[in-house]
Amino acid sequence: MKHLKPINQKAARIEAYVAHEAAQAKAEEMDVVGLGGRPPHEENGPHFPLGCSLVFAPGWEVDSQGGTAGLCQPVERDIFDCHLSCFWPAHVPDQLNHAQDWTGKCASAQKDWRKLDLIFP
Amino acid sequence: MTPPVATGALEETGTSPVLALREFHTFGARGARFLYMVPSAGIFRMDDAGCAILDALEAGPLDTDALVDALSDDFDADRILETIEELVEIRAVGHPHAPKEQVPNDLPPADFPLNTMVLNVTNKCNLACTYCYEYGDDKIVDTQYGKQPKFMSDETAEESVEFLLAESKHQPVAHLTFFGGETLLNFPVLQKTVAYARRRAAEEGKRIEFSLTTNATLLKPEIIEWLADNQIGVTISIDGPKQVQDGLRVFHNGKGTYDVVLPKIKDLLAAHRSRPIGARVTLTQKNMDVLQIFRHLTEEVGFWEVGLAPVTTQDKRDYAITPEGKDMMLRQFEELAEEWLECALRDEHHGFSNVRDTIEEIHKGVSKAYGCGAGLGLMGVATDGDVSLCHRFAGSPEHTIGTVTDGVDREKQGRFLVDHHIASKTDCHTCWARPICSGGCYHEAHVQYGTSSHANLHYCTWVRSWTHTCLEIYGTLAEENPTFLERFDA
């Protein structure tokens, strides 16, 4: 530390810890990567940020282009974005086993979402 | 249903992060400003830019750009940014909504070694001090009609030594303290136990250090010689000059003890040079002339060190210290602490051990999970071999955590450690002095609130004032005589 002076033994340990952490953070693999950048292991390949919290998809106000025409609606957003690509768990029927045709009549979520029926086990 | 949004993003104006003050306690010494970090207990000295940043944030959170603008007349931007970075690193400043530093709720490892065992070799006493917690109105254990024998047997004492050797685990040195009642009433067991412990420790490749507390009434040349030869640390319970001592520390017939103990203590101080001899004073509403007591015990009697502690009792007793009494006591403590500092600046000894003990904790930067080591690194043993939290609880079934023959009841000890952890003392969670105090004494809590796990709330103001005073002394020494503090390294 250049400006603050550690005085007691604990402060010296804190200083040593901070220096150690700083040295660790300099190592590339430890770096936190912002959305604008790529993590080192994806440097030469595609980068796939997942979920609506990682891409700019505000949902209800404007889309990523600033437009308002094709906004997702809350219900469809939950069904077709959250449960497919997001870490946020949206509760949907089991489409692998019991309700494989659940979305069969729903070609376009914005128009057809009312055709998604209830599923009874 | 949408993902939770990181609130941090909402607080930032533009791209510069918003900063606010976090938890610390500020103190000054010789014109310098220091931060006592909570809960880490690290101490950092601020430079001018550090002080300016903290002052600017005093009014509320600011973003970094605004901070740089506000201080640009006095410091260049790089200096401010570097200092901010360091303040963030020591956690003096941070995001306004960053969660408070949590008290880590981890318990000590199961194989935590026993460092000090206090052996109550007798629960009988030849004095009847009015304020005594063991015999007075606040007693926990019925020593007169209770189940415990009046004296510890040779056999129990030897089993206790075995318990200490086993429980001290890999530690090369263990401490054995004899306590009572009046310890010297059971001098035969004392002698045998020390001899036995020395022999057994040597066989185990360990060393045991011995000490005892006595009221000095039974000291005689043979005993003094034995204490000196065996390098036994001695603490004398004494309250001060004749009129003070004779008012509170009396024989069963009410006769004062001063004239009996004074010549014996002088003999002890003259003959026993192998360990420092300390005085331990109990302060009550009826004896609180701290300065007079201290001067008498050091200058006139010749004690190397004097430690003073307020009596443990319920508020309704006439000797309980009133709030005004506590203030008066604190002012006198501060006056003595100032004297201690003057001596420390000249590298001289001063016998006020209360300051020395606190300065040592400040220097090391202790941040305690428990008010003391009771039930963990320190345990008390009753005359029948029951192991309790500490000597003050010896013989109390409610506070027994094992026996010297069967060892520690780990389940009971575990429950005690959970209940008494600073994380369980919500009253303490906003207090800056918690790294040092950690809720205080279990026995004090038991007497005052009926449960040992309660924080010593009746001492909060006292503890904060006293800790602040000691921090200022520490800061002054760090500024003017830092080499003095090296004696607390180790």
Image (cartoon, coloured by chain):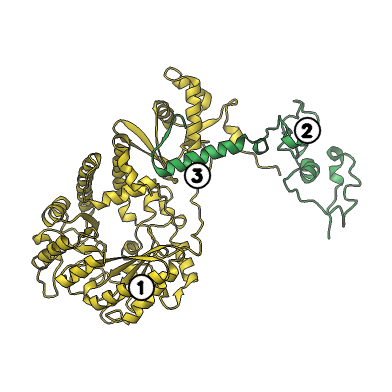
Residue closest to the eye, B201 or B50: B201
Residue type, mark 2 in image: Leu
Q: Which disc is residue A71 wearing?
A: 2
Name the one closer to the observer, A47 or B275: B275
Distance of label 2 from label 3 (alpha carbons):
39 Å
**Chain B pictured colour:** yellow
- Which is nearer the N-term, disc 1 or disc 3? 3
- Indicate the position of residue B169 as horizontal and vertical percent values: 46, 66
Coordinates of residue B396 in the picture (x, y in percent): 35, 74
- Judging by the rendered image, the residue that carries numbered circle 1 is B199
Q: In this picture, is B415 found above or below B53?
A: below
Query: Is label 3 in a helix, a strand or a loop?
Result: loop
Image spot of residue B215 (x, y percent): 19, 67
Point out the frontmost of discs 2 and 3: 3
Residue hosting label 3: B100
- Outermost residue, top direction? B73
Amino acid residing under circle 3: Lys
Dot 2 alpha-carbon crowd within 10 angstroms: few under 14, some 14 to 19, many 20 or more: some
Which amino acid lies under the numbered mark 1 shown in the image of this protein?
A: Arg
**What is the chain letter for disc 2?**
A
Q: Which numbered disc, 1 or 2, marks the residue closer to the eye?
A: 1
